[in-house]
Amino acid sequence: MSHDQLGLFAPSHDDTSDDTNNIQQQINELTDDLNEHAHRYYVLDDPIISDAEYDRRYRKLEALEKEHPQWKRPDSPTLRVGGPPLEHFEKVQHRVPMLSLANAMDEAEMREFDQRIKRHLKMPASASIDYVIEPKIDGIAISLLYENGVLITGATRGDGVAGEDITNNLKTIRTIPLQLSDKDRKIPPVLEVRGEAYFPRGAFDAFNAKMLANDEKTFANPRNATAGSLKQLDPKITAQRSLAAFVYAPGYSEGVEFDTHWDFLQALKHWGFQVNPISQLCSGLDPVVEGYHNLMEQRPTLDYDIDGMVIKVNDYDLQERLGAVAKSPRWAIAFKFPAQQETTQIETIEVQVGRTGALTPVAHLAPVQVGGVTVSRATLHNQDEIDRKDIRIGDTVVIQRAGDVIPEVVQVIMDLRPEDSEAYVLPNVCPVCGSEAERAPGEAVMTCTGLDCPAKLKASLQHFSARKAMNIEGLGKKLIEQVVDAEMVVHLSDLFRIDFDGWTSLERMGEKSAQKLLDNLDKSKDTTLSRFLFALGIRHVGERTAQVVAQAFPSLDQLYNASLHELECVQDVGPIVASSIHRFFNQEKNRAMIEELLELGVNPEPPPPPVEAGEADPSFADKTFVITGTLQTRSRNEAKAQIEERGGKVSGSVSRKTDFLVAGDAAGSKLRKAQDLGVTVLTEEDFLAMLGENA
Ligand code: IVH
């Protein structure tokens, strides 16, 4: 629709003879136009006008409606801001009960579901059934009733028989059409659809952050926030919450019939609903199982929480023949994912002391399974976090583990708090060495001030000997604890002073192991400057930073003499990192420690001279590389850029012309092909060595 048709830019003298029809038509056209653009924006994710332009048209409609409320349409986008508040919610009887789903816990139960269906339908076990698979949205079930295409009632599921009338709240959700579109498909006189309202993750995080900033109660997860938002008697509050909705099931309808669920889902899209885009039609069970694994992988990348996958028989005749048992249909099942949140109890809070002396409170939990692993500890970060969430020993808490992230306490369940509980305050002395612990102004962490705190020393030694640092094989946590507790190591360098007798004096240390360890200690002394820098445990200096700093200052002397400004000039080194490095090398005791290490034979090799940008490196120039699998130290794109900077080429597929295949973890067919063709295969370490970084 053009702007002119909308009368947006029409000169005002066009509106002469109080042409009421004209105004009503303008309201109609603007309503259609805005609904169309909102649908493009919210449902199709494909806007074609700017937000500002949308706002302009919206305000125009708002003004016209204010003057002529009699022509305001029931699907006007201005209704999305929420009407007047209610006293209470009315009850709504569901004309067809809202069922729930039986669960399958593993693949075997899913196969059993498929077999059960075939037995019930008297089909051979080898027959193939068509299924639709859909993500199981972890939100709040809703029912939407349309009469002649207009949204009349929106309700919660309630007990499945009757729910609550939350129409005004649901009208604020922009992915729920107020008026169905009849552009591609006829609208039935009565249509009830069911689905799930949810809080998109991004919007939820922003919302919780805002609540936190205003000192208001945050929600443990998007599902709770959705429930809370839909229960508001004042729809204006709901309107501020950016909820969304997917639809996935038919309810009571008149004048429309579908042969299959897949057809039904397509019709929903035409009518303007948001249907989940990763729903899929599968023929037989194998693609269903594959779909489950794919969905599991996609789970962390989705902008909404899902707690499993729903499998539905596609054919509605078959669905009818299968019917329901108790409260769930026989034709569908939910294949659940492991939960990512659980509740458990805090048994005690332990304070750990890290390498930098930071005191970290760690909650010891009654063990629970979260996302498939047993969790018995969760970090509480610092005093501020504890205060903010008011976490106490003895509390029952919601914990969460998202992906590989360390488990964290999300929320305390206040109703279950023991009466005699007390607020938790971190000790002001180090629990390991008894020195004073202090909190630097502006920082959240408490730090142990003890110079020789054994906890700091142990953590430093562990870091020093780690694989990516000095790589001292065989020197594990247990041994480090023993040598520190026995005061055989008081300073880092003492590690290289322990002799054969010293090592064999330790518990469970045989002569052979002692000799091996001494050999490994010796071997570790020949190292690279970047490993050595990383091993020193300078604050903010990780493996990558150590590498770039070693490239820029290839000897310790140069590092000693580097000015703050020179350090800041190194690419990827910001002012905080630069000042940390500068401070470290300007402390006498650190220099002394380094000198001792050098005297004891530690020999950090400078990196090979760097390649100037644009200057070709003979090992790379005109060579063709293929990168496959996952690299640990950088993304494939970064690796590609580094190859190209040195004059090499990167190709996507392996052929006889390939000079090198860089094979990261889980390299697959490309690696096999390279081996078949006799192409040189580089491990990540080989590749780093070629780059002149760490070998
Ligand atoms: S179908 C008769 N499909 O899971 C079957 N449900 O325990 C009706 N849910 O109450 C449900 N995503 O709130 C269906 N794609 C989906 C779903 C889904 C989430 C929820 C729904 C229902 C519960 C089943």
Image (cartoon, grey):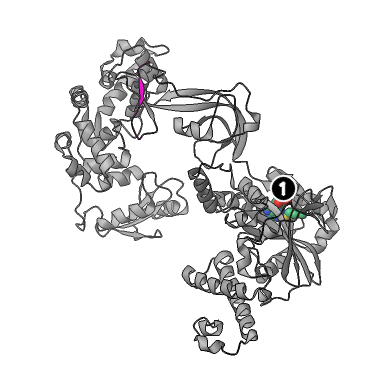
Write the residue at 62% across / 34% down. 343
Vertical side of 310 occupied by 361: above or below: above
Write the residue at 64% across / 70% down. 76
Vertical side of 221 occupied by 514: above or below: above
Dot 1 corresponds to which residue? 110
Q: Which range is magenta?
A: 434-442
* Kind of element beneath mark 1: helix
| Nearer to the camera, 335 or 645 | 335
- Asked if the stretch drawn in magenta spans residue 607, the answer is no
Q: Residues within 10 Å of mark 1 (few under 14, many from 20)?
A: many
Judged left or right of residue 593, residue 462 is right
Count up the numbered dots: 1
Q: Main secondary structure of the magenta part?
A: loop
Quadrant for the C terminus in the image: top left
Quadrant for the N terminus in the image: bottom right
For ligand 1, tell me if the residue under mark 1 lies within 8 Å.
no
Q: Position of residue 645 (x, y in %)?
A: 26, 56
Q: Quarter-wise, where is residue 196 in the image? A: bottom right
Q: Amino acid at mark 1?
A: Met
Can residue 218 be seen in this snapshot? yes
Can residue 259 be seen in this snapshot? no
Judged left or right of residue 635, residue 150 is right
Vertical side of 529 occupied by 221: above or below: below
Q: Position of residue 22 (x, y in %)?
A: 62, 85
Write the residue at 20% across / 44% down. 552
Q: Quarter-wise, where is residue 65 in the image? A: bottom right
Q: Quarter-wise, where is residue 344 in the image? A: top right
| Nearer to the camera, 463 or 107 | 463
Q: Position of residue 104 (x, y in %)?
A: 72, 45
